[in-house]
Image: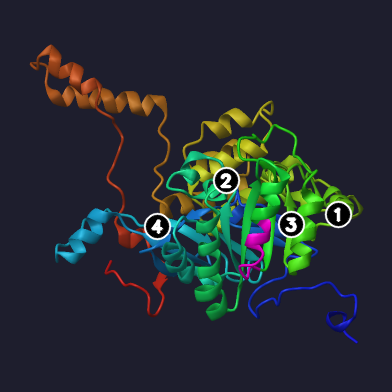
Amino acid sequence: MTDALAPNAPKRVPIPKNGVDYRGKIVLAPMVRSGELPSRLLALKYGADLVWGPETIDKALIGTTRRINTIANTIEWTRYPSSYLRDVENGVTPSPDVNASVIYRLHPEKERGKLIFQIGTAKPEHAVEAARLVAADVAGIDVNAGCPKPFSTTGGMGAALLQTPDRLVSILEALVREVGREFEIGISVKIRLLETPEKTESLVRRLVGTGITGLTVHCRTTPMRPRERAIREQLKMIVGVCEEAGVACLMNGDVTGKDEAIQLMQEYGADGAMIATAAEKNSSCFRSQADGGLVGWEQIVREYVELCLEVENRWGNTKYLLGQLIPGKEGCYRPMNQSKGYEDMVKALRFDDLIEKARHVDQRLNIKPAESKAVKKAKRKEALAGKGEGKGKDENMDAKRVKMGVEPQQPLRHILEGVQEVPGAVQLSV
């Protein structure tokens, strides 16, 4: 007799064919900036069972073009500026210097069956429209109903949904009905604690009745900041409600590594655990002590840089994460923080074997080489000389305020070299 048919077997909602069961999983939390592709790949390397991408607002994804980047081996959803699209619609040849912005990027091979797409939304119809664009490429769709930051709560998204349960329920039901069933993936939600245990229980009971396969609870209330200790007194109650409905329950908040995650899951009965801050600092937190535990920051930085170069990660994001990974007291921190591109950065970190690769990625991303102070001074002097000695004082003063060394961006054709359109996707001539 199978467990599902055993008399005392716990109830479990069916897991769709292309979905994934959250039970027994220790996963990477959705984090803006810290949840981009290189961070997710590094977490998977060190043992994360699943990875959540950063919250992506529905309206940011709607209208994007799905592309396959054959150089980085990634799938990307890109968007052009409204002025570019307006020119295309009006039959006007757009500027060749316009670049498409990458809104979302995933690795179809390394993240297959492991990636959960988290959506920021406040309307069922927008949630469905956006989710349908990525549903075929991910293992699940998760609704953000826990982020307390203004960029998420503005417009009724994130933690604001906790105060509008009818809206949240309608969003989940629409996603289950119009996305989950068609694409055969699971729909889940991530929440925070409400003001009282009674309010939390009431909300959770409504949510587990929508057809979702998983619920994650961040054990803090909306006003609480990460530095405040997580509240776990309500966790067993929430786990019990989820268990009655057959919905997997993940816990989040002050989980520092795999060993602690397992201990907390056993203590509170949670089906899984989600790691955030600890993973932002060192992805090897997903490795148990028995398997070697945490590795040094130097190794993590090296592996992270290699992944960033491999997938052509946005430079600003790479630099931000390196600032989290490298201890501020280390000698390489300051030169890394002053770097202006990938080539600068690998030189600052003394990864000399990566210089050529970094230079190539800089060219692909149109990142200009940093200029020395001497070169900048010479250019300013040359520009002033070009104004002529007979110019008035005011004009010379204006010249000093002109930004020097800024060149036009390379043509879009150069940037999109190696990127092919997906059949059936919106096609734009380049």
Helix, strand or loop at mark 3? strand
Q: Amino acid at mark 2?
A: Cys
Query: Measured along the vertical axis of the image, is residue 260 above or below residue 7?
Result: above
Q: What span is colored magenta in the figure?
A: 204-212
Residue bearing the label numbered 3: 250
User: In the rendering, which numbered label is found on residue 147?
Assistant: 2
Q: Are marks 2 and 1 in contact (CB under 8 Å)?
A: no
Query: Is 105 included in the stretch rendered in magenta?
Result: no
Q: Position of residue 220 (x, y in %)?
A: 69, 41
| Residue 10: quadrant of the picture | bottom right
Label 4 environment density (alpha carbons within 10 Å; few <14, some 14–19, many ≥20): some
Q: Secondary structure at mark 4?
A: helix
Question: Sequence-wise, which precedes: disc 2 or disc 4?
Answer: 4
Quadrant of residue 138 within the rendered picture: bottom right
**Which residue bears the numbered disc 4?**
59
Residue at horizontal 49%, vertical 46%?
A: 152
Numbered disc 2: secondary structure:
loop
| Lower sequence index among marks 2 and 1 | 2
Question: Cα distance, mark 2 to mark 4?
Answer: 17 Å
Disc number for residue 262:
1
